[in-house]
Amino acid sequence: MKTLLHEMSWVEARKYFIQNDFAILPVGSTEQHGPHNPLGTDHLIARALAEEVAKLTNTICLPVIPFGVSPHHRQFWGTISINSTVFKEYVTQVLLSLKYYNVRKVVVVNGHGGNADALREAARKMREKHEMFVSVFQWWPAATKLQPKLFNSEERGHAAGEETSMNLALHPRLVNMKAAVNEKPKKPLAESDGIITWIFDTTDYTKSGVFGVAKSASIKRGKKDFEAVVEELVKHVNTLKKMKMKDLLAKNLVD
Ligand SMILES: [Zn+2]
């Protein structure tokens, strides 16, 4: 069965939506990932994970939303940022289009941390106002939990060894390892501590856009990372598929 919505005809989509109330939506960003990784890193990884899991679970997968909330990277050329209000509304409109075809459960596969707040708000609104249940899956915390030793903490930063390894495994021709750098992030003027939040940009921390060690990246570790996350995401999709809509929906006013 075809699983990519944009490759189906409306006749094929009709067949799927009549039988299924479930879909996967990948979202990411177009933003700097150091001098060696493509600007599309976050949306390319989210798309690859979502498409693979869609195949393995016979679920429809939407085209990736390639732009996200990335104002903190704007000083690096080519970063395209959408404000969180517009991003949230855009995602909501996509979800409402799915609802029109009777989709009630959606897993959003997010590739960019800056999107998290807006996605959480959109998911909450869908449950409160539109009787849909949307979960948000983020691959990097899953990867760290599943294989804590595969990368060290300096390799887990933005554009560092882990993301670079994922890129090497998924689309090696887009990575220029000769340009890869290791950069220890600078201490900013002040650090957020859970009491006070300080807002800085990536340029306040690094020259290259890399947070940590990128040169150690490898295809082998990228593949291992990808496979582990796919397995976890398959589990989540299957769990949510089995859950009953009546249990997932918001409860009524208490007596
Ligand atoms: Zn990234």
Image (tube, rainbow, N blue to C red):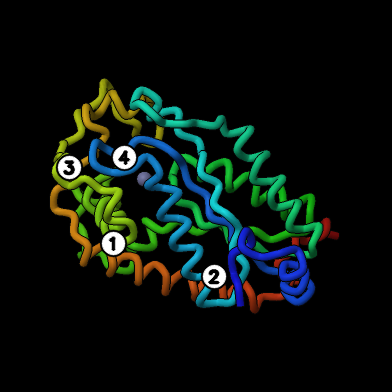
In 3D space, how far apart are the residues under numbered discs 2 and 4 (Cα atoms)? 27 Å
**Earlier sequence position, callout 3 versus callout 4:** 4
- Of residue 223 and residue 117, the one placed in the foreground of this image is 223
**Earlier sequence position, callout 2 versus callout 3:** 2
Is the residue at mark 3 in contact range of ligand 1, meaning its CB lies under 8 Å from it? no
62 lies left or right of 167: right
Q: Are marks 3 and 4 in contact (CB under 8 Å)?
A: no
Residue in the image at 19% along x and 29% along y: 186
Residue 33's tag is 4
**Label 1 sits on residue:** 169
Label 3 neighbour load within 10 Å: few <14, some 14-19, many 20+ = many
Q: Is residue 33 above or below residue 232?
A: above
In 3D space, how far apart are the residues under numbered discs 2 and 3 (Cα atoms)? 32 Å
Quarter occupied by the N terminus: bottom right
Disc 4 residue type?
His
**Earlier sequence position, callout 2 versus callout 4:** 4
Q: Is residue 254 above or below residue 207?
A: below
- Image x and y of residue 166, in percent: 30, 57
Label 2 neighbour load within 10 Å: few <14, some 14-19, many 20+ = many
Q: Are marks 4 and 1 in contact (CB under 8 Å)?
A: no
**Label 3 sits on residue:** 180
**Quadrant of the rendered structure where residue 93 is?**
top right
**Earlier sequence position, callout 4 versus callout 1:** 4
81 lies left or right of 124: left
**Earlier sequence position, callout 2 versus callout 1:** 2
